[in-house]
Amino acid sequence: MSETEHLIERKEELFTCDLCNKTFSKKKNFRAHLKIHTNVRNHFCDVCDKAFTNKKNLKAHLLIHSDVKSHVCDVCNKRFARKSVLIEHLRNHTGEKPFFCNVCNKPCGGKSELKNHLRSHTKEKPFSCDICNKRFSVKSNLKPHLLTHTKEKPFVCETCNKGFPRKAGLKYHLLTHLKENEKPFVCHICSKGFGQPSNLRTHLLTHSKEKPHICEKCGKGFSQKSALKYHLLTHKKEKQFTCETCNKSFLDNLDLKQHLLVHRGEKPFICEICGKGFTTKGNLKKHLLTHSGEKPFVCEICNKSFNQNSNLKYHLLTHTGEKSHVCDICSRAFARKSELKVHLLTHTGEKPHVCDICNKAFVQRGSLMRHLLIHTGEKNHVCDICSRAFTQKFELKLHMFTHTGEKPHVCDICSKTFLQKIDLTRHLLTHTREKPFSCEICNKGFSQRGKLKLHLYTHTEEKPFVCEICNKGFSEKRILKKHLLTHTGEKPHVCEICNRRFSEMGSLNNHVCTHFKEKPHVCDICSKAFTLKNELKRHFLSHSGEKPHVCDICNKSFALKSNLTQHMLTHTGHKPYACDICSKKFSRNHALNKHLLTHTGEKPYVCEICNRGFAEKGTLKDHMGTHSKEKSHVCKICSKAYSCLRSLRQHLLLHSGAKNNVCEICSKVFSQFGNLKRHLLTHTNEKPYVCEICYAAFSRRGHLNRHLSTHRKEQPFVCDLCHKRYCLKGSLRKHLLTHTKEKI
């Protein structure tokens, strides 16, 4: 055989691998391939010591360290070190997926994507965290996970100084600062701008509404073939793939596989920006929009935009008013099937989601997740203005409105604005007078389910909210919160004008009104001005004399329904509002709130002339008369004048001789109920008002206040003639006699 013939024969010879049957024409390539099976890695990187089976792979790896990225994407200008990575990236733009999984036929855009996907079948997780030993199937998922341990955020935004663990996160964030006209990918139909081409493509579907893939059975159209394929399974109506853990059934094997991740707690799709994990790629895609702030789905009716198509669909129902999902028990209708599902649990009382720490149960998983943050104490959402931290993003969002003063939800009837949509919904019921929730015991109607729930406690006298310090029980969580402040002495609400502190927001709001004298609502008849529109409405009734609300028992009529309701309690004797501190009962919630101030010592209404504080607005008004010396309320019988109406009313009882308040012990009668109450203490020898400094006890609060001034050495009563000061008003009166030489 000649040398030429020998070379031709060698050229045709193929080298076959016994392990994987792959063939090679060159012995050199065959030898390099065998190293893959033997895992021999003789070629080392000088920078990071990573080992490779051949020189070619090492060469490609070195480009990562050199920062040379010579391969540029024509669509989005992203740069890559290797051509193969660029080719794989381009498939994201074209949507091409040429590689298929041998197990489930899932299409993949590149070899690396296919390789990562195959690990979901083999359950292989070769990448391990050195700190917590958590394992990952993909190396790119390990990288963001490691940053959760270090809390390192090396990539900082120059505009707002917000830090990110990865460069990709910063890139996404920068899109939020871009104005609409600065975004590179623009819709040719409506000129809306987008930071990424994928979001523009998604948005364009909302314009075209083209659905070329039609279902032969029901005629429904779909924009994608995969969506039609999935829809066809709904006609089978047979869910043959069942979860062995919870017996939930699925139409598709892929859906079952994704569902199983929930039980395993596995979240293979990791966000590169914040490290959050997701069970499906679709959920990760949706999540990414929260970082970019882009909302590609636009409502054609009101131009409101959404980051998810499902949210747009739900929003459209607000225009149509369509509620196709009806409850079989109470006939209440819902726009979403998921809402009906949650509603049905209110009938069954079922709360399937239980907290492992305190065993508290919840109707929805989201509620449980929010509850768990209470145990961890985690507050990741921080306000950039005042640095206050919140457990949930929506809490931060609401808090931001306190800085801007914005109230985005407006009532169409009276133009009143609200911070939250739920507050607007509740407010609308005041216009419709609708009270859909009725008490089964007394048939009383309520506009909100929560109010009915609280009302039921008045029948059962149940107090499920218990103070951990003194074991006292409360019917409402908000009352427990107020009560806890009595232990801590905390006053978290501060007046920005005078820095005065209050334990309750309501007390602060009342106090703030004392700084502003603005009264925009003016009566057309007598020109009297009011701070609130509601106060003006009530005032109008005093001119018309109209009293449309009549008592069925004694025929007494009232201008306001609330006054009739209060009056009815005088017949029944029912006092549903009890003080949690001293158990005293009241017929009205307003009266209870006033009473609570006697325990806290709060006096939100401050006199601008002498800085004296008062618990009630009415008392401040009466006090202001002492400064003006104006006595506009005159007795028609004896012409005696008073600075406040209440004093005149008390005086009139002296003329009428009416003494309706009788002491049951000694039969002594009194014109005022307050005087009877004070008299009763003489029988019981009870002295409920105790001085905290020397523990001296008094039967009246007024006597305690006088006594306290001796400790403080306060002398608020001043003689106008010689400027001498006194602790008590009575002492000043006696002193005045020395000037006038008259008996008062």
Image: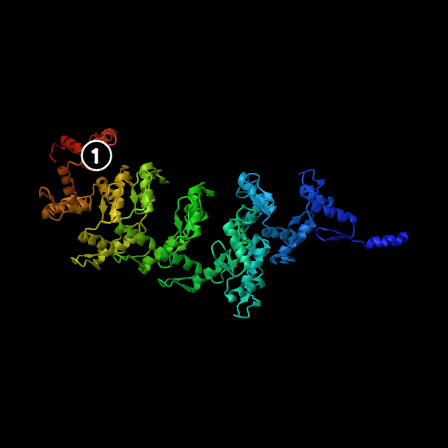
Q: Is residue 156 visible?
A: no
- The residue identified by callout 1 is 704
Color style of the picture: rainbow
Which of the two residues, 457 or 256, is positioned nearer the viewer here?
Answer: 256
In this view, the residue farthest toward the front is 18
Residue type at numbered disc 1: Leu
Which quadrant of the structure image shows residue 694? top left
Q: Residues within 10 Å of mark 1 (few under 14, many from 20)?
A: some
Left or right position of 592 against 427: left
Task: Kindly state the secondary structure of the residue where label 1 is placed.
Answer: helix
Which of the two residues, 675 or 589, is positioned nearer the viewer here?
Answer: 589
* Residue shown at the point (58%, 60%) measured from the top left: 188
Q: Is residue 701 visible?
A: yes
Q: Please state the total of marks drawn on the protein image.
A: 1
Q: Where is residue 273 in the image (x, y as percent from the top left)?
A: 55, 46
* Residue shown at the point (24%, 49%) measured from the top left: 576
Which quadrant of the structure image shows residue 426? bottom left
Which of the two residues, 238 or 501, is positioned nearer the viewer here?
Answer: 238
* Residue shown at the point (72%, 41%) measured from the top left: 43
485 vs 410: above or below = above
Give the quadrant of the C terminus: top left
Q: Where is residue 201 in the image (x, y as percent from the top left)?
A: 58, 59
188 vs 486: above or below = below
Which quadrant of the structure image shows residue 707? top left
Q: Position of residue 560 (x, y in %)?
A: 24, 56
